[in-house]
Image (tube, helix red, strand yellow):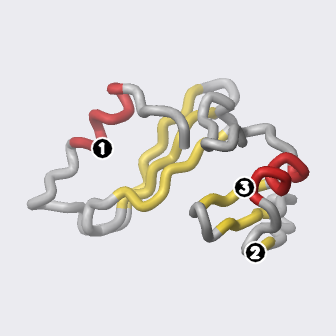
Amino acid sequence: MGAVLPRSLRAPLCRCDPARPPTLPTLVRWYKPPRNDGIDVHVTKGGTVDRIWAVNDERFTTPKNLHIGSTDAEVRAALSAPSNVAVDDAGKTKPRYYREPGLWFYI
């Protein structure tokens, strides 16, 4: 993503001691009301960040300027056809997965 994490968000991630990694996968969330916008970070059992995603926050963009609020047409124009499309009937979304460059979008 194109944004750099602010110091207030980086600090908790830096507290992972490589000599004592988490024993369980951990999900860390930074959301602010009233829209519950912010980011999620998934940390593996070994203490490695393997996923970062933005939720309702337009400040985070990809190098191709895709962001929260981008349309399906904009995503396809920038990245072509997705590697996989799933249907989430419960959430009423259609996640689009792109193996390269390792992105997914919920439309």
Q: Which mark is residue 52?
A: none
Q: Residues within 10 Å of mark 2 (few under 14, many from 20)?
A: few
Q: Residues within 10 Å of mark 1 (few under 14, many from 20)?
A: some
- 58 left or right, relative to 44: right
Mark toward the start of the polypeptide (3 vs 1):
1
Judged from the image, the secondary structure of the residue bearing numbered disc 3 is: strand
Circle 3/circle 2 CB separation < 8 Å: no
Residue at horizontal 19 percent and vertical 61 percent from the top = 21
| Quadrant showing the N terminus | top right
The residue at which mark 1 appears reads as: 13
The Cα–Cα distance between marks 3 and 1, rounded to whole angstroms, is 24 Å
Q: Which mark is residue 84?
A: 2
- The amino acid on which the numbered mark 1 sits, given as a three-letter code, is Leu
Q: Which mark is residue 105?
A: 3
Residue at horizontal 24 percent and vertical 42 percent from the top = 14
Mark toward the start of the polypeptide (3 vs 2):
2
- 60 left or right, relative to 28: right
- 50 left or right, relative to 101: left
- The amino acid on which the numbered mark 2 sits, given as a three-letter code, is Asn
